[in-house]
Amino acid sequence: MCGIVGYIGTCQAAPVLLDGLSKLEYRGYDSAGIAVYDGNKIQMQKAMGRLKVLEEMTQNGATLPGTVGIGHTRWATHGAPSDLNAHPHFNKDHSIVVVHNGIIENYLKLKKKLMSKGYEFLSETDTEVIAHMLDYYYNGDPLATITKVMHRMEGSYALGILFRDHPDEVYAVRKDSPLIVGTSKSGNLIASDVPAVLKYTRDVYFLENEGGYEHFMLKEMHEQPKAVKDTLTPRIKNGDVVIEELGMTDEEIRTISKIFIVACGSAYHTGVTAKYVFEKLARIPVEVDLASEFRYRDPILPENTLVVIVSQSGETADTLAALRLAKEKGVRTLGIVNVVGSSIAREADNVMYTWAGPEIAVATTKAYSTQLIAQYLLAMKFAKVRGTVSQNDFDAMIQSLERLPEQISLLLSHKENVQRFANRYLAAEHVFFIGRGIDYAISMEGSLKLKEISYIHSEAYAAGELKHGTISLIEDGTLVIGVLTQPKLYEKTISNMVECKSRGAYLMGLTTFGNYNIEDTADFTVYIPKTDPHFATSLAVIPLQLLG
Ligand code: GLU
């Protein structure tokens, strides 16, 4: 991930660009650059390393005149981090300049073609083909030219582009990489993310790939494949899990005697899933605690305990208090946090960021999904170091993890199915979610989503527990949603569903493709793609979010 900023207005552009880029530093980068147009000449400065280097080179932007410009922080995908590979990239006569976030998948083919037409490449980036292609197709009309180039490119991109012939314009397009537009009296901006423009404006437009969403929650649900990928990919290297920010030696990992996962709300539910995953894979005992309980119950934290604190905002009051308590008691703490520089991120001994991007909807979706990923990775890392998982199983799990983003996309693309069902059950007053093990953890999150979004009363029950009293609330037509992603528990939960059915319940099943005999019991079934059962929460939660 990297960042793009663009500005056109009445102020000097360079300081605005540098300031915007500094707000995108949280996305990670290895080099930075800006290009500014003063109506006469497009000037560029770029440098490997921190933004500070660029700030010093340009005296905080003062040396670059002009009120139109684009800037970039790069996370190299094609070509090593270097001054030359840093963006922006020019066409041959410096009349077009471009910054790019993403990957041009067919760049080699394009590059060969351009070289055969005499284009020379100065960098090793995929991005430089864009500059030369714009040059190749340029006919005086930037929009027509960009459109043509977009038809030739495969992959993901957010682009900021300046044309020397069009001194009053900044062009921006996106496909599968984020880009927003901010408008203000003193100028208009583009950026990869909202924080970069907040200093100048609150009027922000989200450019969508395929049109807008009805509300933020739906938008953020659709951002889950990317959020999951962004959280996962940087931590999988050569088939291994690498968590540099963990700050623990293998020896320290081996001596962990107990893990506490402490959180609130949906983050707590990720902990409930993670407990099963940690215990199964790494064979470390785990307690999951609600932060509001943990902080007041004087918990016993044995030596070599690791306290994992999970929070989207990094500011959740109870969770922060729980972190402080754990620190007071002298045990090691690890924050899993989405907001960079937040209180929990600052105060925990170590912090593992989830790269979900800003979450605007109150009901969490993409932060939840990334919190799961962070904990799967931790559990796998611990399991590997402690020798509690075979290499074969580990390799297969890595493959399963890598398939998740695409599988989540698939589930989201079938949302009409869930929508139709939700329409039928609009008038439901009580809904029960039942499941065992990880399926129970999924049920808890499904139930919370339903409550907080639709205001329908619902309960999540460990499937085997329902019969101890609560089953008497199930009557004709009560909706019961059985979650059955865990092969070993499948038959058990089916039998609990049958119990509900005999009391007249209407049954929805949520299970894995292949378990078609569920249709003998359930009245309506949603299937999720096959994955390692430890990671099923990441898939099963999607239809439940949609249902909510
Ligand atoms: N693929 C481009 C490069 O390696 C852009 C990477 C990025 O998104 O920063 O230069």
Image (tube, rainbow, N blue to C red):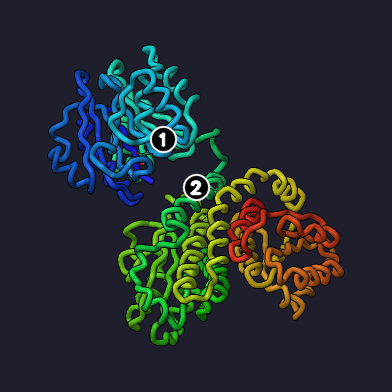
Q: Is residue 30 left or right of residue 292?
A: left
Residue at the (67%, 63%) spot, across then down = 457
- Compared to residue 68, the image places residue 18 above or below, namely below
Q: Is residue 168 visible?
A: no
Residue 355 appears at what percent x and percent y?
42, 53
Q: Position of residue 453 (x, y in %)?
A: 60, 55
Q: Is residue 267 left or right of residue 455?
A: left
Which quarter of the picture shows residue 365? bottom right
| Nearer to us in this view, 13 or 534 | 534
The numbered mark, 2 or 1, whose residue comes first in the sequence reads 1
Position of 20 with respect to 64 (left or right) is right
Q: Residue at x 45, y 51 (%)?
A: 230
Mark 2 = which residue?
A: 226
Helix, strand or loop status at disc 1: strand
**Circle 2: residue type:** Lys
- Residue at left offset 57%, top offset 40%: 214
Residue 177 visible: yes
Residue at the location (52% across, 46% down)? 223
Disc 2 to disc 1, C-alpha distance: 14 Å
Amino acid type, label 1:
Ala
Q: Which mark is residue 374?
A: none
Cβ(mark 2) to ligand 1 < 8 Å?
Answer: no
Disc 1 packing (10 Å; few <14; some 14–19; many ≥20): many
Q: From the viewer's perspective, is residue 451 above or below residue 72? A: below
Task: Find disc 1 in the rendering and name its residue.
Answer: 158
Cβ of mark 1 under 8 A from ligand 1: no
Q: Quadrant of the C terminus?
A: bottom right
Outermost residue toward the top in this view: 139
Task: Decide if residue 42 is on the left or right side of residue 299.
Answer: left
Q: Residue 92: percent from the left, percent from the top?
A: 28, 21
SS label for mark 2:
helix
